[in-house]
Amino acid sequence: MLQQPEYLTDHISLQFGEHVRLDGYAAYDQPRGLLYFITDEGYEVLSVVLEAYGFVAPLGCVWIKDWSEHTGVTEQLVSLGVVSYEKTVRVGPFDSPAHLVSVLPSQAKVRS
């Protein structure tokens, strides 16, 4: 459930998988450590908790999985200036990549 996230961007577009492109806003809930993509129809949580694998995101950072529908999302957010790449770890039975990113200051001009 969304609390009061800080909008990080004005309107952007993200590609999810090969066939889905969504328009919306990147937002960050720092107290809960969650990064969202908010659309007119709802929201997608972009961050993932990796504590079960021994990885905790420092304050101001989140983990983003790089598998399934989130493949390539981190790269898009870096290129849009929403986050800054820190490192990659591999987790789970399929040795899947997850990226630690620092959330950059808000670029949003109309939302807060």
Image (spheres, grey):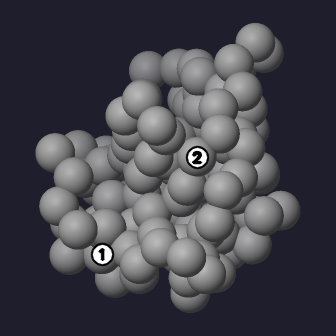
* Alpha carbon distance from label 2 to label 1: 19 Å
**Which residue is at a point 34% across and 82% down the rendered structure image?**
59
Q: Amino acid at mark 2?
A: Gly
| Circle count | 2
Farthest front residue? Answer: 110
In this rendering, position of residue 79 left or right of residue 38:
right
Q: Residue at x 42, y 58 (%)?
A: 35
- Out of 54 and 49, give the one closest to the viewer: 49
Determine the residue positioned at 42% across, 52% down: 36
Q: Secondary structure at mark 1?
A: helix
Is residue 60 visible to the viewer in this orientation of the structure? yes
Q: Quadrant of residue 3?
A: bottom left
Quarter of the image that includes the N terminus? top left
- Is 93 above or below relative to 53? above
The residue carrying mark 1 is 30
Q: Position of residue 93 (x, y in %)?
A: 44, 21
Placement of 71 over or under 109, stated as above or below:
above
State the mark number for residue 24. 2
Seen from the viewer's position, the closer of residues 34 and 13 is: 13
Q: Residue furthest bottom?
A: 105
Whether residue 97 is visible, yes or no, is no
Q: Residues within 10 Å of mark 2 (few under 14, many from 20)?
A: some
Horizontal and vertical percent position of residue 64? 51, 49
